[in-house]
Amino acid sequence: MHISILEEYLKLQEKSFKISFEEAYKILNSFLEVLINDRGKVSNNFRRSKGLIYLNENIETLYVIGDLHGDIESLNLILTKIKNIGKDDVIVFLGDYVDRGYLSFETVFSIILLKIRFPENIIMLRGNHEPPINLKPYPHDFPYFLRLKFHDKWKDIYEIFMSIFQELPHAAYMRSKLFLVHGGIPVKEHSLEIIDKASLENYFSILEELLWNDPSDYVDYWVPSPRGAGMLFGIRVSREFTRKNKVIAVIRSHEPCNGYKLNHGGLVITIFSRKGPPYFNEKLGYGKFKIDKLNTIADVVRGLELLE
Ligand SMILES: [Mn+2]
């Protein structure tokens, strides 16, 4: 069985451009309900615990899409390449759907509609631009774009989005294969049980690290991040984490680069999926991993795709 994901997506994208306040409000509210009730659910391709998604090992192809920041054109390019997926295929988005791009609403809303349409095949992780209420990034211009679209009713839409963002899972894990997260791995806490529980109320500093950390080839262990939140983590942290949790590599986004980059000898791979201003990278990247052929860092690197 194959799913024409591109065809469906183009219809949903069109809907996101034309949608009224009333309909958007209704859809976002029901999506929030689904997310809240999603915890503990087992489905064909994954199981959601609290903040962590456990991906099934029988997934055939795993696609990974990094930061979009309102760049719907880049999303169109990637989905044009993917075109069709099978029922055992999964697309994981690594977060940062909004801010910096004037089509922030249309980008995040199209992905939400896609998730509602194909709940088994789409996973939306949280980025630092889907922020905890007490840790907002800069710039956070999403409210401004909502005001342009929904005028005096923008605040109602923004508030629902903020509630949705609090409910998005913050990492995904596939045993003996990969750990997926927006920012990076926590420098001291490598237990998946604790990572799963991290939230505004519990282990908040772990949540902050997952959303904000960056790898660095210039530190061994860690130093505070110049971003003002999170840490820079070194190769020793990556070695310990991947060994303890038995994964080949950590795949994350969060840092602009020309599609992708490798740190720590490939133990940490960054995928960046928007291109052009404000970062002016010429290429965008995404991942296409055949799970049964994924055994080494070289296999992971072979799955990295670039588009111009
Ligand atoms: Mn980010």
Image: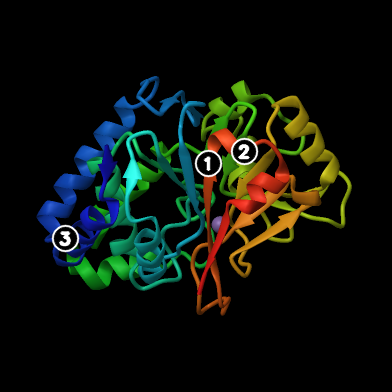
Residue at image point 40% right, 39% down: 89
Residue 18: x %, y % from top left: 14, 66
On the question of residue 253 being in view, the answer is: yes
* Element type where label 1 sits in the image: strand
For the residue pair 158 and 75, the one nearer the viewer reads as 75
Residue 15: mark in rendering: 3
Q: What residue type is labelled 2?
A: Leu
Residue 290: mark in rendering: 1
Note whether 303 is above or below 42 in the view shown.
below
Residue at image point 38% right, 24% down: 39
Label 1 crowd (10 A; few <14 / some 14-19 / many >=20): some
* Element type where label 2 sits in the image: loop
Task: Write down which quadrant ligand 1 falls in.
Answer: bottom right
Residue 16: x %, y % from top left: 21, 61
- Closest to the camera, between mark 3 and mark 1, is 1
- Check if mark 1's residue and mark 2's residue have beta carbons within 8 Å: yes
Give the left or right position of residue 220, taking residue 185 as reference: right
State which tag comes first along the sequence, 2 or 3. 3
Query: Could you tell me how far apart the alpha carbons at marks 1 and 2 are, in whole angstroms?
Result: 6 Å
Q: Which amino acid does label 1 sit on?
A: Lys
| The N terminus lies in quadrant | top left
Label 2 crowd (10 A; few <14 / some 14-19 / many >=20): some
Label 3 crowd (10 A; few <14 / some 14-19 / many >=20): some
Residue 134: x %, y % from top left: 51, 47
Residue position marked by numbered label 2 in the rendering = 294
On the question of residue 158 being in view, the answer is: no
Give the left or right position of residue 128, taking residue 224 as reference: left
Residue at image point 11% right, 53% down: 23
Note whether 278 is above or below 288 in the view shown.
below
